[in-house]
Image (tube, helix red, strand yellow):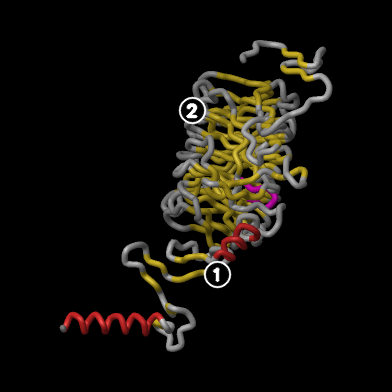
């Protein structure tokens, strides 16, 4: 009898609950189950709330987005930033890669449609690549010389400047013809100088030398055949890591008891004057780039990029930092307010928008083709990377016109649509063209039937028949 009464009570309670709304944390529930507060599923992951945030700004596994939030994110969220001309975090997009072993490339610079890469050792090489088509880069010239270990490279006008560590030399190469690299002049910097980084501007070359000299030296190459030593200045007990020249000032990063960013007045090349300096322990600076009166310094010690206001050369002020996807950063290069940062720690190339100088916006990272990327050069909307461990030159593109699409494997970069219509048939993606597919895998990828009116040549640009094939054919 007691069991029967218990069953009757349960049935009555169930019937009562099913006929009205139940509220948890709310006195007037508006649904069968109305929860006002956090929700946790003991048999699964914690769920904090249902979110209508179309930007997914909290980036949390504990929020469940609404259907409209997901749709809004795909249409106008940070993926596309509201305009096809603004890069989203799908950048950077990997493009071409060199197909030969460069033997530890240490630095890269670009002049016009030619990229120049210097290798560290085995033997020293300065190689020119045609990068006019970023998807198909090829070598146009090479200069080799045994016994030299290159530390840095800089290209200015018709010349390329390299410095060597073990032989303490400065080399000047004529690159006026991309098909030929010839040595114009060389200078021995003297024992103990150990050149670390080089920068060139106008008719002057700026070299910072490591311990024991710890100096900034200026060289005059007004007469390229005869390089002349001009002024120099001691950097104290700190060892320099990089130098950047903007206007009448040289910006030098050093590490030591107190790591520093220092400014030097170089308006008189025969009398360098020390100006402002700022220090912070354990920054371990590796690279510096000045853009719009702000210096961006990569910090290998803190895995971030530090921002400094250098408007007043006598008073450098710190303006924060950024660190998303930054891991053991080796170099930074900026073009059109877009910063490319190479990271040895995660073998990635990170991209940031610096339109707001003190509040950079992270735009993405690529690990494609990279293995210990050590140096990057930004030009236009492209980043050219010297990938040290796999000995390759790698090209990356912001691909501003790309959008996104949803596939069974997730959200991916979609090709730009060239022609619209009921079938949306023509697309461009990563330099490839797709007809009937938005994800082409070759230079021309066609899905569906094709009709060719006229002559078709394979392996020839002058077909003599309806189908003209030159070379081996496999069926």
The range drawn in magenta is 333-338
Tell me the quadrant of the picture where the N terminus can be found.
bottom left
Residue 334 forms part of the magenta stretch: yes
Q: Residues within 10 Å of mark 2 (few under 14, many from 20)?
A: some
Q: Going 65% across and 23% down the picture, which residue do you hit?
A: 139
Location of residue 349 in the rendering, given as x and y in whole percent from the top left corner: 55, 44
- For label 2, the SS is loop
- Residue 67, visible in the rendered structure: yes
Location of residue 146 in the rendering, given as x and y in whole percent from the top left corner: 53, 18
401 over 161 or under it: above or below = below
- Residue 271, visible in the rendered structure: no
Location of residue 451 in the rendering, given as x and y in whole percent from the top left corner: 77, 27
Q: Is residue 402 left or right of residue 4?
A: right
Tell me the quadrant of the picture where the C terminus can be found.
top right
Q: Residue furthest bottom?
A: 27
Q: Label 1 vs label 2: CA separation?
A: 60 Å
- For label 1, the SS is loop
Residue at mark 2: 166
Residue at mark 1: 52
Q: Going 78% across and 20% down the picture, which residue do you hit?
A: 456
Q: Is residue 146 left or right of residue 41?
A: right
């Amino acid at each position: 009898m007691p069991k029967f009464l218990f069953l009757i009570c349960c049935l009555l309670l169930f019937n009562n609950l099913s006929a009205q709304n139940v509220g948890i944390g709310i006195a007037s529930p508006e649904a069968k189950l109305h929860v006002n507060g956090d929700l946790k599923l003991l048999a699964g992951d914690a769920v904090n709330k249902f979110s209508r945030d179309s930007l997914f700004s909290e980036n949390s596994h504990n929020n469940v987005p609404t259907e409209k939030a997901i749709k809004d994110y795909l249409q106008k969220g940070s993926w596309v930033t509201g305009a096809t001309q603004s890069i989203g975090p799908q950048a950077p997009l990997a493009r071409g890669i060199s197909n030969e072993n460069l033997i530890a490339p240490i630095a890269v610079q670009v002049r016009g449609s030619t990229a120049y890469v210097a290798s560290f050792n085995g033997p020293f090489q300065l190689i020119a690549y045609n990068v006019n088509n970023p998807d198909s880069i090829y070598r146009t010239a090479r200069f080799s010389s045994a016994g030299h270990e290159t530390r840095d490279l800089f290209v200015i006008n018709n010349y390329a400047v390299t410095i060597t560590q073990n032989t303490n030399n400065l080399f000047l190469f004529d690159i006026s013809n991309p098909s030929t690299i010839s040595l114009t002049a060389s200078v021995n910097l003297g024992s103990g100088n150990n050149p670390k980084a080089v920068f060139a501007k106008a008719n002057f070359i700026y070299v910072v030398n490591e311990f024991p000299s710890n100096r900034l030296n200026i060289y005059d190459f007004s007469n390229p055949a005869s390089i002349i030593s001009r002024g120099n200045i001691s950097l104290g007990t700190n060892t320099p890591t990089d130098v950047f020249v903007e206007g009448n000032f040289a910006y030098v990063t050093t590490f030591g008891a107190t790591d520093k960013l220092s400014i030097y007045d170089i308006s008189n090349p025969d009398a360098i004057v020390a100006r402002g300096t700022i220090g912070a322990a354990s920054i371990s600076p590796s690279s510096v780039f000045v853009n719009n009166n702000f210096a961006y310094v990569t910090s290998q010690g803190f895995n971030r990029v530090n921002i400094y206001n250098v408007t007043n050369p006598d008073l450098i002020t710190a303006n924060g930092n950024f660190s998303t996807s930054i891991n053991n950063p080796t170099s930074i290069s900026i073009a059109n307010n877009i910063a490319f940062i190479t990271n040895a720690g995660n073998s990635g190339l990170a991209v940031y928008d610096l339109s707001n100088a003190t509040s950079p916006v992270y735009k993405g990272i690529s690990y494609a083709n990279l293995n210990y990327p050590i140096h990057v050069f930004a030009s236009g909307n492209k980043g050219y990377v010297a990938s040290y461990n796999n000995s390759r030159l790698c090209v990356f593109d912001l691909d501003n016109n790309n959008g996104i699409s949803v596939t069974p494997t997730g959200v991916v970069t979609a090709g730009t649509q060239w022609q619209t219509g009921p079938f949306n048939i023509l697309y461009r993606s990563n330099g490839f063209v797709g007809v009937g597919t938005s994800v082409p895998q070759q230079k021309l990828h066609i899905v569906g039937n094709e009709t060719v009116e006229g002559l078709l040549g394979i392996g020839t640009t002058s077909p003599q028949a309806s189908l003209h094939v030159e070379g081996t054919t496999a069926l």
